[in-house]
Image (cartoon, rainbow, N blue to C red):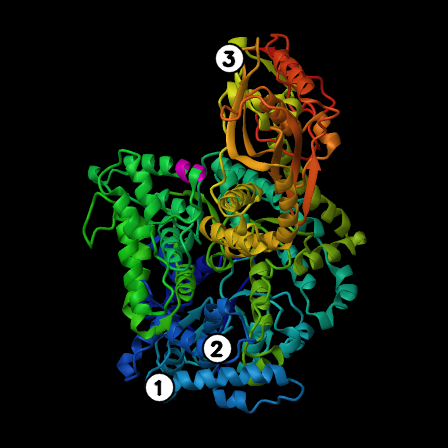
Amino acid sequence: MLFEPQDNPRIFAVPNGVDFPRALAQGLVQRSRSMPPEGLARVELIVNTSRMMRRCRGLFEEGPALLLPRMRLLTDLAQEASLQGLPPALPPLRRRLELSQLIAKLLDAQPDLAARSSLYDLSDSLAALIDEMQGEGVSTDVIRNLDISDMSGHWSRAQSFIGIADEFVDGHDGAMDSEARQRQVVLNLIDAWQINPPQHPIILAGSTGSRGTTLMLMQAIARLPQGAVVLPGFDFEQPAEVWDHLHDALTAEDHPQYRFAKLLTDLEIIPGEVQRWSADQPASTPRNRLVSLALRPAPVTHAWMSEGPQLQDLDAACTDVTLVEAPNPRAEALAIALRLRQAAEDGQTAALISPDRMLTRLVSVALDRWGILPDDSAGLPLQLTPPGRFLRHVAELFCKPLTADALLTLLKHPLTHDGTAEQAARGDHLRHTRDFELDLRRYGPPFPEAASFEAFGSKRDLIPGWTDWLTQNFADQQVITPLHLSGWVDLLRQRAQAIAAGSQILGATESGTLWDKKAGQKALEIFANLEAEASHGGEMSARDFADLLSAILSQGEVRDRDAPYGSIMIWGTLEARVQGADLVILGGLNEGSWPEAAKPDPWLNRQLRHQAGLLLPERRIGLSAHDFQQAIAAPQVWLTRAARSDEADTVPSRWLNRMTNLLSGLPDQGGKAALEAIRSRGQDWLDWAEVLEEPTEIPAAPRPAPRPPLASRPRRLTITEIPRLIRDPYAIYAKHVLRLRALNPLVQEPDALLRGTVVHEIFEHFIRDSLEDPTRLTREYLVETARVLLEQQVPWPVARLLWLSRIERLAGAFIVAEQERQTRGKPLKLEVMGEARLDPLDFTIACRADRIDQDDRGFLHLYDYKTGAPPSEAQQKKFEKQLLIEAAMAEEGAFKDIGPAEVARAAFIGLGNSLKEVPAPLCDEPPAKIWEELKQLIGAYFEFEQGYSSRRMVHRDDLAGDYDHLARFGEWDRSATPAPEDLT
């Protein structure tokens, strides 16, 4: 007999600071020594997680040799459901799909309830609520009978929930969800035990009873003749009066020991009757007492005043505790990584425990610099793996017109056009993709289509079928009409596999390496499940399908394929309950992480949940508090937090705050000194991390003024480059001597450059058409010309409307001014090229004149359209000399079809929000003078001593140039003297 007979329920516990699985295994072996060898094999051990089972099995296998107990999981009980005649459980994905359809109908009927994008989040929350109701034994009838006074808004949502739940249940008459089956199995088991209680030992270990079904089973097992429950992390130091305050869920459920208090109350036993499972002692009993007092529930925090002075050995409690209060998450992660590296060198097992996945990723990155790959229990979310990202990108093709960035994202993806066979030709594919990217950046279009693929292919020697493959899989993939989920899944598989296989490996079943390796296999498993349940999905839009796919992929996880560094681990709070380590680091101890912020319930508020007997949001906080209380009792503990996140200042975790406040309030017992010591130890590591991050000092670059050989200096410039030569000569050097060109953005936008190009073309067409037919010189024809050209060349509807409205606003004034201009002279040339040599210099100046008119006397009138603000006369005299230079070129005969002619007038025509004409100061700056000044300017740069200094006279310091990064601007400022550098 394993246990001595007793009348009361049998509850055992393991204190905080003891390795629970090890204590469980050793205690079971110790208790079974008086039994025959087969006695242990008759013991039925029920644990709550597969990790706990694996750990216990491993501990038993360490020796000595013995017959193992029968171990099983709580969830294994549901496998007995079919033997009891219960119907099979609904697959979770099928239930999720059906609920999402019901919620979609609700959102269509009540659009103000939630955004459409929240459809699958709502379906998940509703599925979780139904699970919880079934687990707690709460029916929709209970919800209907709630007191709804002063809760009309919440009640309206609750009614919506009841309607959906009833409709869902009515549609599955005779079927059960997994939670309902689990509860029914437990109820059947309890009924059977009451009639014929088992005589062999049954032990349920490791659960806190946070779920109603589990709590019922724990109570039933505790009452069996040879049944026992073993609780983890029980606070044996907590006084009886504190236990008495842990009965009201509304005020106490966030306490770490609340679940145990509820269990003991239901079993009608007192905490003093809970027995220790083993003789194992905590790593630090003084620390357990300190934490227990710090975490007292709010109604009894006055105990700090009465019990605080009685705390002893605060130095011993804090000896192996380090508090790291970093200025930011990066510093926190680096300090943690340094300590983990130290543990690896010393041969310690160390674990970082944190719900903050961003922090754990930062730590992993920091450890990578030393070649340490931690054993991360969470792995990587499937949606962030290459196959997950690939499938999401392909699904996005159906949602909107193809853009250049979306196309190249897929073309460059490591799974695209990939395969193990040589004929996959991924190298050729990447080469073509690189060329196509440059072509798209330079020439567009912003929304690639079949014609642009064909045009690119006609100019280059590509592998056979590549452009056809692009057209088939990328062009016109947007789907406007809703499809059934089965159709979406088939379309996604077909398109994803064709893109992955590439243009050289054809076949409906070819998929390249999409489904290879762990991530691919997991993605295929989830995708196959989606295919199997797609018939229950109903019709949906492309956007809804893409959101559904992302939501499903986000629930899968993939462990890293590389062999991790075994002694360095990253755990979630669930894994930490069943593992032990020499050093435990509790990271991210801020509100929102420890504890995690409670998820809002869109269906039932807190008061309604309490009335219905459902779990309160504080339950998660209480479980997190219990995790904290267990983890901080480890042999060596680090507590870390960042004082500021990326966005704002942070708030320390409530438990860390309580502990530090309690210590600081006990100066006579050495609490304040102990707190300063644990902070000092943490600061030492932060200082080391800061030293590690300190960059190697590199001398600042001087302000450049390169002097290339005369033969390498530019021999041709356009008049639009002359202002740049004056303001930023280094840009001319980089462009014409180094032959560097700024890379055009991949995501093309309706910017000022495009607007200027299109507006120039609009007025060129309008003026040319009005010369052919003077009756077209009307506002209506100008607006119609603008509408046609904008439709052709601007694929952004909003930009088209804005730009057209601007032209409509100034069209009337332009017609009046144009009529006046044509009384002075008739348009002679539009968009005409011209060039002239500067003798005796070997140099050519070129231009493209927007418009040249000629009057009856043969004089020229030059006009330059400006969609931005035209330069003032003062600016033209100093820097913006392009129109003055154009006038000088005209008098020098730069335009062949016109010949040398005197310029009577030149003006900028501003086509911004309003029409504005700014004349060029030809009287003050005559063409002959401008021509000589131009010769002097260009001639200066044919002197070897003249360098191309950077940002010589920029218009404003905050304006960035294309080549500022090359000039290392920022390491010097405008006050720095240019440093000439002779180049060979």
Quarter of the image with the N terminus is: bottom left
**Front-lying residue, 763 or 381:** 763
Chain part drawn in magenta: 438-442
| Residues tagged 2 and 1 counted as in contact (Cβ below 8 A) | no
At label 3, which amino acid type do we have? Ser
Q: Is residue 620 magenta?
A: no
Location of mark 2 (residue): 108
**Relative image position of residue 19 (x, y in whole percent):** 49, 56
Residue drawn at x 50%, y 73% as measured from the top left: 209
Query: Mark 3, residues whose alpha carbon is within 10 Å: few (<14), some, or many (≥20)?
Result: some
Q: Is residue 324 above or below residue 969?
A: below
Lower sequence index among marks 2 and 3: 2
Helix, strand or loop at disc 3? helix
| Structural distance between the alpha carbons of marks 2 and 3 | 69 Å
**Front-lying residue, 869 or 78:** 869
| Residues tagged 3 and 1 counted as in contact (Cβ below 8 A) | no
**Front-lying residue, 294 or 969:** 969
At label 1, which amino acid type do we have? Ala
| Residues tagged 2 and 3 counted as in contact (Cβ below 8 A) | no
Q: On the image, which quarter does residue 27 sit in?
A: bottom left
Location of mark 1 (residue): 192
Query: Mark 1, residues whose alpha carbon is within 10 Å: few (<14), some, or many (≥20)?
Result: few
